[in-house]
Image (cartoon, helix red, strand yellow):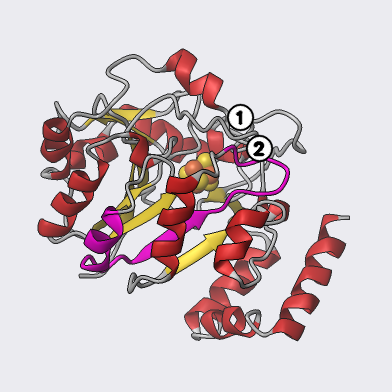
Amino acid sequence: MKTIGFMDVSTNIGCKNMCSYCPQEKIISRYKGPKMMELNDFKKCVNKIPKNIRITFAGMAEPFFNNKCMEMIEYVHKEGYELEIYTTLMGMNPNFVKILEKIPLAYFEIHLPDDSNRTKMKVNKTYLKTLKEIKNSKIKNIHYQVFGKVHPKAQEILKFEVEDLSRILRSRAGNVKGFKEINHSGKLICPIAGKFLKNNALLPNGDVFLCSMDYGLEYKLGNLLSSPYESFFKSEAFKRIQNAMNSQSGEVLCRHCAYAKKINSPKYIIKKMLEKIGLLDLLYLTTKNKTMHKIYLLFYKLQKK
Ligand code: SF4
């Protein structure tokens, strides 16, 4: 079944990692409800989500800090959904690796520890054992990500180069201080959520928000424990968000988000054209080539100046 959107699950609130680029204080101060998602509540919520919505375990906290996370993943798989996991491996038991090998993950992103402790993880024996088992596992679609240089102990296990992606760190739609402010004007679109805004964030109390950039919890679409999924996209909140995005300057989270694109900008029009004629994927593939990647990074730096 073709994926038409995503539901990003925060299995817990108040991530113990407290990474330097993540606005945890903001969500902790605004959120009301159980800090850990109950397995039964999770199942009730999932049962209301259409099968063409991909469930992603990521959200606004490390998913495995909820000790029911593995059971949640197994449930989602058993019910026939596509799924993705984004994790620092904190809270993950090395025994989970064997279970994950049997689940076809659409994407499995591992955030690695760095040498300057930006991603604040405990690089202890359990962590290193889990990382080693994952590296040697049959799990498909693994992607490693690091902001800085890989921590030497993790590097000893991986033994291959992982690109420093510090350049993609952003303010999370204006929620993290110390980054360049973004204030888009004009009509906007979210390339991830599309015009129907189906890239939403589910919290442990069943509340569903626009997306996982909404650390201030200001754009609530509804509650999945008490309402059907479809109702979110008919809600007043949803219409307000869409109207603001379709206006020249209406206030909405996306105006401050690095992902948002101006609908009529030449860059967006060219991208759409390439996508239509099937060249975008090809262009993306060429950036995997080392020389092309260097050229891409050069353009990226020039564009930022
Ligand atoms: S805030 Fe960013 S990620 Fe969220 S819907 Fe808007 S553009 Fe997309």
Q: Residue 86 carries which label?
A: none
Image quadrant of residue 21?
A: top right
* Closer-to-camera residue (207/187): 207
Q: Is residue 260 above or below residue 297?
A: above
Residue 194 can be seen in this image: no
Instruction: Report the amino acid beneath label 2.
Output: Ser
Q: Which residue is drawn at 26% across and 42% down?
A: 69
**In the shown orientation, is residue 114 left or right of residue 277?**
right
Q: Position of residue 65 (x, y in %)?
A: 36, 35
Residue 250 can be seen in this image: yes
- Graded by Cα atoms within 10 Å as few (under 14), some (14 to 19) or many (20 or more), the crowding at tag 2 reads many
Residue holding disc 2: 171
Q: Position of residue 162 (x, y in %)?
A: 64, 66
Residue holding disc 1: 175
Q: Where is residue 169 in the image (x, y as percent from the top left)?
A: 67, 47
Instruction: Report the amino acid beneath label 1.
Output: Asn
Q: Does the magenta-highlighted stretch encompass residue 104?
A: yes
* Closer-to-camera residue (301/118): 118
Q: Is residue 244 above or below residue 264?
A: above
Q: Identify the secondary structure beneath mark 1.
A: loop
| Range of magenta residues | 95-120
Q: In this view, does 250 lie above or below 291?
A: above
Q: Identify the secondary structure beneath mark 2.
A: loop
Q: Does the magenta-highlighted stretch encompass residue 262?
A: no
* Closer-to-camera residue (111/285): 111
Q: Which residue is drawn at 70% across and 59% down?
A: 164
Image quadrant of residue 173?
A: top right
How far apart marks 1 and 2 lie (CA) works out to 6 Å
Question: Tags 1 and 2 in contact by the CB under 8 Å rule?
Answer: yes
Quarter of the figure that contains the C terminus: bottom right
